Image: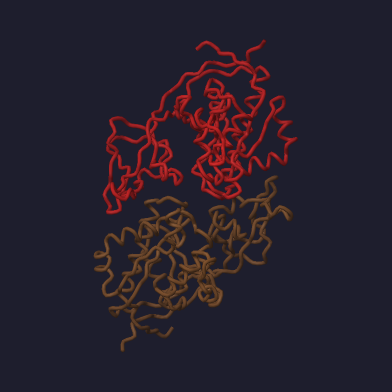
Chain colours: A red, B brown
Amino acid sequence: MEPASLPAVSRMALCGGTHGNELSGVYLVREWQKKKRELEGEAEPVTVMTLISNPRAVQQCKRYTERDLNRCFTPSLLSTLVSDGVPYEIARAQELNALLGPRGNCDWICLHIYKYIQTKLSSMPVRLLNLNAPPDQNYFLASVGKHALSIEIGPQPHGLVRADILSTMKEGVHLMIEWLRLFNSGTEFEGGIVEVYSFLKNIDFPRDPETHDITAIIHPQLQDQDFCLLKPGDPIFLSFSGESVVYEGGEPLYPVFVNESSYYEKGTAFTLTRMKKVEIPPLRLKRD
Amino acid sequence: MEPASLPAVSRMALCGGTHGNELSGVYLVREWQKKKRELEGEAEPVTVMTLISNPRAVQQCKRYTERDLNRCFTPSLLSTLVSDGVPYEIARAQELNALLGPRGNCDWICLHIYKYIQTKLSSMPVRLLNLNAPPDQNYFLASVGKHALSIEIGPQPHGLVRADILSTMKEGVHLMIEWLRLFNSGTEFEGGIVEVYSFLKNIDFPRDPETHDITAIIHPQLQDQDFCLLKPGDPIFLSFSGESVVYEGGEPLYPVFVNESSYYEKGTAFTLTRMKKVEIPPLRLKRD
């Protein structure tokens, strides 16, 4: 592929606590706010802004207080008039948008950072999940940035900090800063092929049509198998009376977000994705 | 040891949802309420009552609504006058006490059931934790029963059901019922030595004396090491600046409840226990 060239990236926002009970990001941001100088020195000349996305939810150690903040960044919610009855998170989304926007797209820079982290981070596998939302339906905080990446390390238990997850998250962010510095200073990055998992659809639990209670749970053979190929005929649910429900789709796909407690209320037992190999071009700084 | 003999156990209460976000017990109780006949047949002549301990917290998928129900069973709270301002859980504790009490003690029957489950359950290790509370300070739901056993399978993520944990919990309860039937029908159980972990003290996280924020997290070498011997000099905490804090106690002890999210608010990073070998006598039914 022809090399691409893009302007320097001069500012970076590090947001933790978008969900108030996912504590690794919260503790990492707090730590960096204490060591502001050190982080500034490391990132220079990139300016790093650190912030807690949902301070009220963090204070209560809940995912959110009135509405899931990470579903509030659609253009329509960002332009809702904020009056007394509006949920706290919608108002907060507008503040964050004013601070961090305007929105951009997942682009060569994101894909190159992903490739870089995947090569350098040894403690666990690194994958890219593209949620494919069209701009007018993209409700994620990350969507307000010009080059938007969320680091998810999981499954991460809610309401506590594990040293292993915290240290991997820290390593991921340091690698991101390292990439930005290299890119801004003129390093050319090789192109290549990367794997991208793209959102297809959410699958709900089987439910009782009247009470809406779930009637089956994730099958033990699917539990903990995020990003592992699911083939037609593989078991996906186990009913309380002991019967297996199998996957009846027409093609093998990759499940993610398998059995996430926060998604029970959203009607998602797991999400199906398709894996694509994407070619990315060599990339270097565009000089004036 | 001399054989002991005790009267038959004619009633059993199966309580799920004492904490509303620990869902295995909730789903197990609901399943058994649907299959009442089947369970009655299996347990006969023991009468089994199934109930959800904290229905309001279950409905909200929270540990509790106003006060931790499993800290409300002290004699003093059980005799508090219930008026308008009293937390829901205190009122509910009094209802449960009226239904299930009066209280008993952990005794030969509990220790024999523990030994039986330990022998028969192969999917994971089984241990007995004795919290050693004197009767006037014992605040646990189980304390209102005559022979009180809580089955804890963990760590169990909050707000979701895992098939492996649900099936182990089910197996544990079936073994308990099996033991009761055998005992009631005259089977003599051999005595022997069992290991019991006894509560010594709770250890809090290191905290900032002014803000009370935690300044260190569980050390990766202690994470997931519940019931593994902790020796003086072993690391227990890792500060955000990267320094290890070591265990300075005078004797090797066994940590439990390591890094439980629900205990951050209670000031407990982990709990230290001492392991004792306890001799239990052969046991059989006392005939009239």
Q: Residue at x 34, y 85 (%)?
A: B286
| Residue lying at the far front of the rendered structure | A84
Lateral position of residue B225 relative to residue A222, left or right: right
Residue B278 to residue B224: above or below: below
Residue nearest the viewer, comparing A152 with A205: A205
Quarter-of-image position of residue A14: top right
Image x and y of residue A233, in percent: 27, 38
Residue nearest the viewer, comparing A27 with B177: A27
Residue nearest the viewer, comparing A110 with B126: A110
Image x and y of residue A194, in percent: 48, 24
Residue A143 to residue A5: above or below: below
Q: Residue at x 66, y 52 (%)?
A: B214
Image x and y of residue B284, in percent: 35, 81
Quarter-of-image position of residue A221: top left
Image x and y of residue B23, in percent: 42, 55
| Residue lying at the far bottom of the rendered structure | B288
Residue A185 to residue B178: above or below: above
Residue nearest the viewer, comparing A77 with A138: A77
Lateral position of residue B198 relative to residue A272, left or right: right
